[in-house]
Structure formats: C-alpha cells, structure tokens
Image: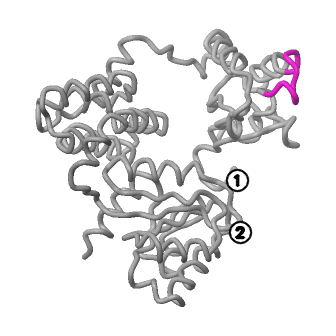
C-alpha cells in the first residue's frame, strides 16, 4: 500500500479493533501517505470501552502521531448510531486544544465567523424565477421545515396556485440541491434537511394538489434486492427523486425477484431502480432483469441500478439501461431515461 502511490488512506482502523496499532501505521506510512481515521468506533460505545479506556486512547493518539504531519483525525470507519455523543464532543475539544502543540505540523483551523460566511457565500441560494415563491424556495434550500408550512399557507391564502407553489417554489429548489450534491457543495445532511422541509410543505399542499390534475415527472419503482438489508443509499435516491417530482413506490429492502416482477406488472412504472450494497447480492439484479424478460415486461420498463459495488460495466453486462454512482446522478439518469434518446 505504501508503494502504491495513493495519497490518503481513509478510515484507518487501528488496534484495539484490529491488529495493527496506530503508532505502527504512522511510523510506516507517515512520510508517504496521509492517514485519515485513527479513532476506532468501538471507543464511542459504553459496552466496548469505558470512559477511562476512551480517555487513555486519546492520550495515546496524540503521542502516536507526533509531530502530527499527514494525519486527519476521524472515526474509523463510521460513527455507530448508539455512540456516546459526549465522547464525540470531547474528541473535538481535545483536538482543538492539543492539536496545536507539540503537533505544529497538524495545527487545526478553528472555525470562525469569517470562514462560515465565506462558505455561505460559496453556496448562496440561486434566486427563484418567480419572486412570489422566493420564501418557500429558500426554506427548502435551508431545510427550514418549521417555517415552510406557514409560508405555504400564506401563499395559498393569497390565492397562489398550489401546483405553482410546488413547481416554482419547491421543486426548483430541490433541483438546485441535487446539483449541489453532485458537485460536492452540499452533503447528505443538507439533502435530508431539504427533503424534510419539502415533505412538511407537501402536507399542506396535498389537499389542493389532489383536487387538480395529477402531474408527475414519471413513475419509479425502487427497492434493494433479495439478500441485502441496506437502504440508506436507496432512501437518498427515493427522497431526491420524489423531491423533483417523480412518483415513487419504494419496496424497501430484501425484495424477492418475484415481488419486483409482480410490482412492475401492477404499478406499471416508467423506471425500475435496483439497489445493492453487497457484492454477494449483485447477481440478484440480473435475475430481476431476466425475470422481467421472461414475463414479457422488460420492454415496458427502464432499469437503473446503483450501490457501492456496482459500476457502469456491470450495469451493461446485466442488461440494465443505466447506472448512477450517487443520488444526484440518479436524478439526472432518471430524467434521461424518461425523456428517451
């Protein structure tokens, strides 16, 4: 790995969760590779580490990575849902305090107001085309789920059309969020906050939308294939597709091939989205496509695939119509598949 030419080793998880100590990683890689990680996730759980164990490891951490060059402190490889939040706070506090000296090479930059303002300016909201809907537009961009309902009610009271509020005020904002997610200007938390605001606003709009003509960008059936219980990525895709106007039926996780086929016949979607996070469940995607072919349904639906182990070549090999590496690209792909060549 040291001779491979990589610049950063991400999610480095040392002893006590694995056999190699952080000190050994740092001694052997520190001149060539930046280490990202170094704090095992087990230290964040009461059942696997006492407070004394946690503090002792942080003491060790600073000794092991001195003088501090080529180190990005992080949880390896992820923060568990039941982590003791106070320990995360203490990690931040100790790095801010002790990451300066003697670790001058690893000096941190405290986040000050000027930094935050520059970041805000970089991703400042695009202006909505119609000034009347600017408030709800910015509510979605900011993820302000508490204010958006009242703002939507105000627009309805003023006589604005519900469909116009949705399209010009909300969907246009979700389009911006999708683009920013693709370019790395915003991340998953921001997308989820915007989606939550969107959903809160829809609770107010739905009775008015139901009374008019139902319009959508298209119908999409989505699910995680049999044997796979992962759904975070799939849920992100569903949220963003729904946010830009697609009608979504989400079948959840561990969906059998027969259920995909039955739902395609019943729901008649324009697109079927298949998700897999495990290499062992990737073959299920081809089984679904083959089953659709056998039932005479394949020509009636476009199939898009995604998930961590999936790539463009695999999508082509199994006969899918498209592959998306992330939720933002999934939206763009769905639009292309709906519009056709």
Horizontal and vertical percent position of residue 15: 85, 36
Horizontal and vertical percent position of residue 317: 52, 81
**Residue where numbered disc 1 is placed:** 1
* Front residue (pair 237, 30): 237
- Determine whether label 2 and label 1 are within 8 Å by CB: no
Q: Residue 166 vs residue 53: left or right?
A: left
- Write the residue at 30% across / 68% down: 338
- Above or below, 204 relative to 110: below
Horizontal and vertical percent position of residue 288: 57, 78
Query: Can you name the residue that lies furthest to the front here?
Result: 211
- The magenta stretch is 45-53
- In the drawing, what numbered circle is on residue 280? 2
Is 72 a magenta residue?
no
Is 47 a magenta residue?
yes
- Above or below, 50 relative to 175: above
Quadrant in which the C terminus is drawn: bottom left
- Earlier in the chain: of badge 2 and badge 1, it is 1
- Write the residue at 20% across / 38% down: 165
Which element carries disc 1, helix, strand or loop?
loop
Horizontal and vertical percent position of residue 106: 60, 22
- Write the residue at 43% across / 11% down: 112
Which element carries disc 2, helix, strand or loop?
helix
Residue 16 found in image quarter: top right
Q: How is the image coloured?
A: one colour
Q: Residue 173 vs residue 315: left or right?
A: left
Q: Residue 123 vs residue 3: left or right?
A: left
Q: How many marks?
A: 2
- Write the residue at 14% across / 34% down: 160
């Amino acid at each position: 790995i040291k001779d491979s030419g990589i610049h950063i080793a991400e999610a480095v998880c040392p002893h006590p969760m694995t056999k190699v100590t952080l000190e050994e990683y740092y001694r052997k890689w520190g001149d060539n590779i930046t280490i990202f990680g170094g704090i095992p996730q087990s230290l964040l759980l009461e059942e696997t580490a006492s407070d004394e164990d946690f503090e002792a490891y942080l003491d060790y951490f600073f000794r092991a990575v001195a003088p501090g060059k080529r180190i990005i402190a992080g949880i390896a490889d992820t923060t568990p849902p039941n982590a003791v939040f106070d320990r995360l706070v203490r990690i931040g506090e100790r790095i801010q305090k002790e990451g300066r000296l003697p670790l001058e090479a690893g000096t941190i930059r405290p986040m000050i107001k000027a930094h935050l303002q520059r970041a805000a300016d970089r991703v400042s909201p695009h202006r909505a085309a119609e000034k009347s809907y600017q408030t709800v537009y910015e509510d979605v961009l900011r993820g302000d789920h508490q204010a958006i309902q009242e703002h939507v009610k105000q627009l309805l009271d003023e006589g604005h059309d519900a469909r116009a509020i949705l399209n010009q005020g909300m969907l246009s904002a979700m389009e911006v969020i999708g683009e920013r997610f693709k370019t790395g200007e915003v991340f998953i938390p921001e997308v989820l906050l915007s989606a939550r605001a969107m959903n809160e606003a829809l609770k107010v709009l739905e009775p008015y939308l139901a009374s008019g003509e139902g319009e959508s960008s298209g119908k999409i059936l989505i699910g995680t294939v049999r044997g796979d219980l992962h759904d975070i990525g799939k849920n992100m895709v569903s949220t963003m597709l729904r946010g830009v106007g697609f009608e979504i039926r989400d079948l959840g996780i561990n969906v059998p091939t027969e259920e995909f086929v039955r739902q395609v016949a019943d729901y008649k979607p324009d697109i079927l989205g298949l998700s897999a996070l495990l290499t062992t469940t990737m073959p299920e995607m081809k089984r679904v496509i083959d089953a659709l072919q056998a039932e005479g349904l394949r020509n009636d639906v476009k199939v898009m695939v995604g998930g961590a182990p999936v790539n463009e070549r695999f999508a082509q090999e199994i006969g899918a119509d498209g592959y998306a590496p992330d939720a933002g690209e999934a939206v763009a792909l769905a639009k292309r598949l709906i519009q056709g060549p």
